Each structure stands twice: as C-alpha cells, then as structure tokens.
Amino acid sequence: KEPNFITNEGKEYAYIAFVVANGENYTYKPNWQENYKIAKLLNDKLNELCPGISKGIIFKDKRFNQHVSDSCLLIEMGNEKNTLGQVEASAELVAQAFSQALS
C-alpha cells in the first residue's frame, strides 16, 4: 500500500493536488484556462522542488469560487491520515514554489 506522504531529504510531506473548476454547467463560468496556467506552473515547480509531491491537476465541473478571479486556486494538501507536521511542511513548500514561480 502506498504511504500517505512522500519523504524528500529526510523530511515528510503530505501529497498535494490542484483542483481547477471549469464550471461547464454554470451560466457564469470560471476562466479556467487562466487558473489552469497558474496551477500548472506551481505543479511543475513543486515537483521540481520535491519530485513526486504533486498528484497533479484535477478538473471538476464546479466553480469553487474560481469564477471570482482569473488567478484562483484550490490546493489540497494531505488527508485525514497525514500528520499536522506533514501538512505544514507541504504548506511551506507551496509558499516556496509560489515565491520562485511567480516572482
């Protein structure tokens, strides 16, 4: 069985996934292409910093308030089986990826 975390350089991280809402069945749709560009950029940067940490980008026929702006993200980190420390480590890595990818 696959563990619920990934280890990189001796540190445990919860897996990360991005959710991009395309809102196909909504009248007012998110500009999902712009949100996808940001998710892809961060997904790639995260996997560069910690290979295999990101489970990728999931597309959903929802909105998740991603119709509010062209730069909205929904980032999932870990699950109920992860420790708080693993999720906090992943959050720090996401912040680092943001800083490097979007500066």
Image: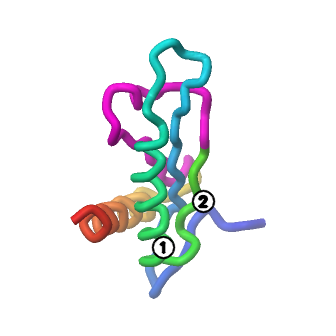
Looking at the image, is 2 positioned above or below residue 56?
below
Q: Secondary structure at mark 2?
A: strand
Image x and y of residue 17, in percent: 53, 53
Q: Secondary structure at mark 1?
A: strand
At a point 36% along the width and 67% down the height, the residue shown is 93
Tell me, for residue 12, which label it has, or none.
Answer: 1
Quarter of image, res 73 = top left
At a point 41% along the width and 61% down the height, the residue shown is 42
Image x and y of residue 10, in percent: 46, 85
Identified by mark 1, the residue type is Glu
Asked if the stretch drawn in magenta spans residue 69, the answer is yes
Nearer to me, 33 or 68: 33
Q: Earlier in the sequence, mark 2 or mark 1?
A: 1
Nearer to us of marks 2 and 1 is: 2
Mark 2, other Cα within 10 Å: few <14 / some 14–19 / many ≥20: some
Residue ranking furthest to the bottom:
9
Quarter of image, res 35 = top left
Looking at the image, is 88 positioned above or below residue 74?
below
- How many numbered markers are drawn? 2
Could you tell me which quadrant the N terminus lies in?
Answer: bottom right
Could you tell me which quadrant the C terminus lies in?
Answer: bottom left
Identified by mark 2, the residue type is Lys
Characterize the magenta stretch by its predominant secondary structure. loop
Asked if the stretch drawn in magenta spans residue 38, the answer is no
What are the residue bounds of the magenta stretch?
59-80
Tell me, for residue 55, which label it has, or none.
Answer: 2
Tell me if 100 is positioned left or right of 61 in this view: left
Residue ranking furthest to the top:
27
Tell me if 91 is positioned left or right of 9 in this view: left
Looking at the image, is 15 positioned above or below residue 25?
below
